[in-house]
Image (cartoon, helix red, strand yellow):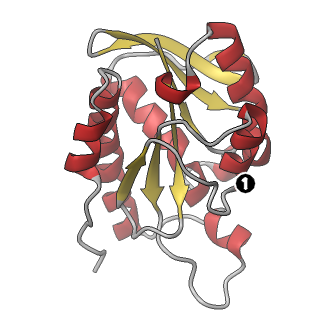
């Protein structure tokens, strides 16, 4: 079994913001595989389904970003998965161009508070993740304002395509093909005009 966690913030005001791209990918997976992600448990909205013959749990923590680790820890403890191989975390990354994916087996938080929280609650940084590039913060912008801001129209189109690509990466990762997913999808994307 795999637990696929998309990071974001609950409530409407954060809908479609850069920081909620993890939620967007979970929604794309839910739509693609006809999985309802509405059950409230483990401080998250969760849904069960099958992807590529593997049982999976889709989860959108409802703790707000900075406390994401609380929900992830509860999910891992309840479903008794091996977080080093059976957890996939999807989140925004400002160090990557808009729409660029970076799949990793482990790594630091890189300043991302949701990932900091998960690392704190797991006690290590070894878990597969898909970083979704949302573009670098423009000079003079406050970081929180930037990540809680909305995409420009042309960026949104790229991010929607990127969410589809992320679902393809997940399809490989849940059958143990993380290396193949990295080879296929850790590439630059064409910048927005």
Q: Which residue is mark 1?
A: 113
> Who is closer to the viewer here, 87 or 153?
87
Question: What secondary structure is marked by label 1?
Answer: helix
Residue at the bottom extreme of this rendering: 140
Q: Is residue 193 above or below residue 161?
A: below
> Who is closer to the viewer here, 22 or 126?
126
Give the left or right position of residue 163, taking residue 113 as reference. left
Q: Residue at x 29, y 55 (%)?
A: 186
Count of picture labels: 1
State the image coordinates of residue 139 (x, y, percent, origin top left).
60, 90
Q: Residue at x 51, y 49 (%)?
A: 21
Does any portion of residue 11 appear in the rendered image?
A: no
Does any portion of residue 79 appear in the rendered image?
A: yes
Binning the other alpha carbons within 10 Å of mark 1 as few (below 14), some (14 to 19) or many (20 upward) gives: some
> Who is closer to the viewer here, 126 or 109?
126
State the image coordinates of residue 20 (x, y, percent, origin top left).
58, 49
Task: Locate the C terminus by quadrant.
Answer: bottom left
Q: Is residue 41 above or below residue 112?
A: above
Q: Residue at x 43, y 16 (%)?
A: 35
Give the left or right position of residue 101, taking residue 123 as reference. left
Q: Residue at x 77, y 34 (%)?
A: 121
State the image coordinates of residue 187 (x, y, percent, origin top left).
25, 60
Give the left or right position of residue 65, taking residue 92 as reference. right
Q: Is residue 38 above or below residue 21?
A: above
Image quadrant where residue 102 sits: bottom left
State the image coordinates of residue 68 (x, y, percent, origin top left).
72, 38
């Amino acid at each position: 079994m795999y637990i696929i966690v998309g990071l974001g913030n609950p409530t409407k005001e954060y809908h479609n913001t850069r920081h909620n791209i993890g939620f967007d990918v979970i929604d794309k997976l839910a739509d693609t595989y006809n999985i309802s992600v509405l059950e409230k448990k483990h401080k998250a909205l969760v849904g069960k389904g099958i992807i590529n013959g593997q049982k999976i749990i889709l989860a959108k923590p409802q703790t707000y970003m900075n406390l994401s680790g609380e929900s992830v820890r509860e999910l891992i403890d309840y479903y008794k998965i091996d977080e080093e191989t059976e957890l996939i975390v999807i989140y925004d990354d400002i160090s990557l161009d808009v729409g660029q994916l970076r799949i990793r087996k482990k790594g630091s938080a890189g300043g991302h508070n949701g990932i900091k929280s998960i690392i704190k609650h797991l006690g290590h940084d070894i878990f597969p993740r898909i970083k979704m590039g949302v573009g670098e913060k423009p000079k003079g912008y406050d970081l929180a304002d930037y990540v809680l801001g909305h995409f420009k129209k042309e960026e949104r189109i790229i991010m929607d395509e990127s969410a589809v690509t992320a679902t393809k990466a997940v399809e490989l990762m849940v059958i143990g093909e993380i290396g193949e997913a990295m080879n296929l999808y850790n590439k630059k994307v064409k910048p927005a005009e």
